[in-house]
Image: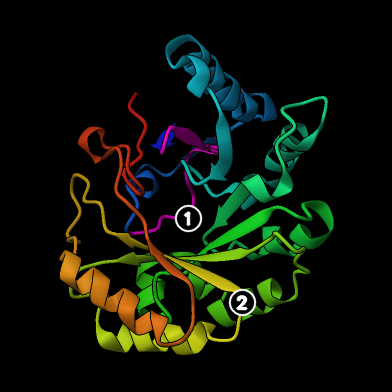
Amino acid sequence: LIPFNNKYSICLSSQVGCAMKCSFCFTGTQGLKRNLSTSEIVGQFLLAWKWLAENRGEEKRILNIVFMGQGEPLHNFDAVKSACDIFLSKNGTSVGNQKITISTSGYLPGLKRWKDEIPGVNLALSLHSPFAEKRNELIPINKKFKLEEVLSYIDDIPLSKKQFITYEYLLIKDFNDSEVDARKTGELLKGKEAYINLIPFNPFPGTEYQRPTDLVVNNFKDILSEYKIPTLIRMTKGDDVLAACGQLNSKD
């Protein structure tokens, strides 16, 4: 659960571990253990809702669902789709389409099913670099599913009035946080129906990556604003218990 102004978002996992092996993500270091079932995905929401009801009283509203926990959601497409059907159903949790966001590293087989099978739900792409050699290091499946092809599929998704595409950009000190990186990203996304989330790197045990300074993060945001792209800096929450973005890992 992620608190924000007395309201909550819930970050759901779709797998135990992950097969994508992204170098910036603690989950990727453990590999893929197994897919979660639909009931296990929905169960996360119900358990959180019950905890809020018992511990937060009138504040028990979960306004947003984001599939940004452990796993690549589109690698477990059928279970994630079924979970979304339950979340959206008036006989389920009755959450609005615009309140659900599914994140992907760019897993193209799942994206190819998106338009017909999960219409109306928001999509977030882990971008992290507009340069192929850097994105190859951060997201190894970029070598198989090229960014240009992924963006082409995303551009073809018909968006409803309240639907949007978010591009997640993880900022790593002295790796992808320079003015050159910012301007190349701006050129790549300008003119698109795009939002950008800037995420300062959250360190985890064994990583060599480092978090950039707040000044660098803000300068990166200022450059993107020149390209008229709405950009937010995501606040870090949960890093004290290794629960922030990119820090999730399972313990046996």
* Position in image of residue 240 (x %, y %): 21, 35
Q: Residue at x 60, y 61 (%)?
A: 107
Indicate the amino acid at tag 1. Met
Q: Is residue 124 left or right of residue 235?
A: right
Q: Nearer the viewer, residue 237 or 115?
A: 237
Quarter that holds the C terminus? top left
Which comes sooner in the sequence, label 2 or label 1? Answer: 1
Residues at discs 2 and 1 in contact (Cβ within 8 Å)? no
Residue receiving disc 1: 20
Q: CA distance from mark 2 to mark 1?
A: 18 Å
Q: Residue at x 40, y 64 (%)?
A: 232
* Quarter residue 225 falls in: bottom left
96 in the magenta segment: no
Neighbor class of circle 1 (other Cα within 10 Å; few <14, some 14-19, many 20+) is many
Indicate the amino acid at tag 2. Leu
* Position in image of residue 137 (x %, y %): 35, 70
Q: Nearer the viewer, residue 26 or 211?
A: 211
Q: Is residue 87 left or right of residue 251?
A: right
Q: Residue at x 61, y 65 (%)?
A: 165
Residue 151 is marked as: 2
Q: Residue at x 54, y 14 (%)?
A: 50
Q: Nearer the viewer, residue 63 or 36?
A: 63
* Position in image of residue 116 (x %, y %): 84, 58
* Position in image of residue 203 (x %, y %): 21, 51
Quarter that holds the N terminus? top left
Mark 2 secondary-structure assignment: helix
* Position of 143 relative to 18 (above/below): below
Report the magenta residues as a range: 5-23
Residue 131 seen: no
